[in-house]
Image (cartoon, helix red, strand yellow):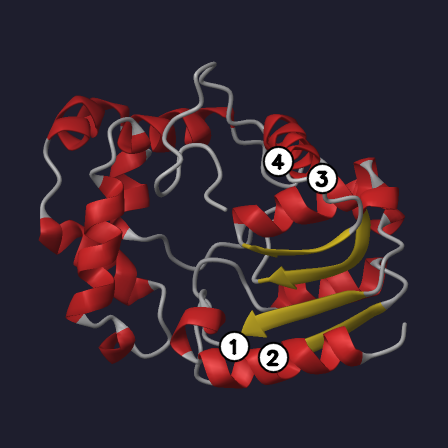
Amino acid sequence: MDLPGFGLTGPSPQGDYRIDAYVRFVLRFLDTLNLKRVILVGNALGGEVAWQTAVLAPERVRKLVLIDSDGYQPSVLSMPLAFQIASMRGLRWVSERILPRSLVESSVRSVFGDPAQATKEKVDRYFELNLRVGNRRALFQRMDQAQFGSNSALIHRVQQPTLVMWGEKDEMISPDQGNLFCRDIPHCQLKTFPGLGHLPQEEDPQATLKVFLAFLAASN
């Protein structure tokens, strides 16, 4: 599922990219598919949407998997070039209309622990998805509406069994924050992946899937 403002879903008609709007979207999505109780998995922003959904509607979430997740006050080591430009209001008019492929490639390479994993096929796919009408404007709106870490006090309310996975070379969200999640969530296990960055599930699908399947098979 692509959240509003990402991938093929396109922008939010209301222009609302706050976390609570995303949580409502996820719950409506589950209702539409008649899914009563699920395992939620989220990466980065998707991770925060997942754990906040688990807090708001605990009866709908059986287990939780957080991958390099947002949630605490950010300890950003670096920021992809595309995000840097999006934060510069003076450049937004241009960047909304002109999207060099080289900019996308630089951003994708920066979120992988091994930049060589940013293959031409992956960069092309990210580039094509960013060309979806409204996605770039949605990025600007999302950054303007973001309140990073403002709800971190709610994390201790997560009661579901939780797997936290983190790439040890993540330079967007410090790997130290994985420890914070497992400090605050009572039923939590942390798995880190040496050499991987912000998107470990894309860099090494086999290694991350092995941990994920073991977590699903556990009885708790």
At x 80% / y 49%, what residue is drawn?
37
CB atoms at circles 2 and 4 under 8 Å apart? no
Mark-to-mark CA distance, 2 and 4: 30 Å
Residue with the mark numbered 4: 29
Query: Nearest the camera: 167 or 213?
Result: 213
- Asked if residue 152 shows in the view, the reply is no
* Amino acid type of the residue tagged 3 in the rendering: Asn
First in sequence: mark 4 or mark 1? 4
Element on which disc 1 rests: loop
Task: Give left or right: position of 16 versus 54.
Answer: left
Label 4 or label 1, whichever lies nearer to me, is: 4
Pinpoint residue 65: horizontal percent, then vertical percent. Answer: 68, 62
181 versus 6 height, above or below: below
Query: Nearest the camera: 186 or 172?
Result: 186
- Asked if residue 160 shows in the view, the reply is yes
Label 3 Cα neighbours within 10 Å, binned few <14 / some 14-19 / many ≥20 = few
CB atoms at circles 2 and 1 under 8 Å apart? yes
At x 20% / y 47%, what residue is drawn?
128
Label 2 or label 3, whichever lies nearer to me, is: 3
First in sequence: mark 2 or mark 1? 1
* Amino acid type of the residue tagged 2 in the rendering: Thr
First in sequence: mark 4 or mark 3? 4
Mark-to-mark CA distance, 2 and 3: 34 Å
Name the disc covering residue 192, or none.
2
* Amino acid type of the residue tagged 1 in the rendering: Glu
Name the disc covering residue 34, or none.
3
First in sequence: mark 1 or mark 3? 3
Residue with the mark numbered 1: 168
Task: Give left or right: position of 54 versus 81.
Answer: right
* Amino acid type of the residue tagged 4 in the rendering: Phe
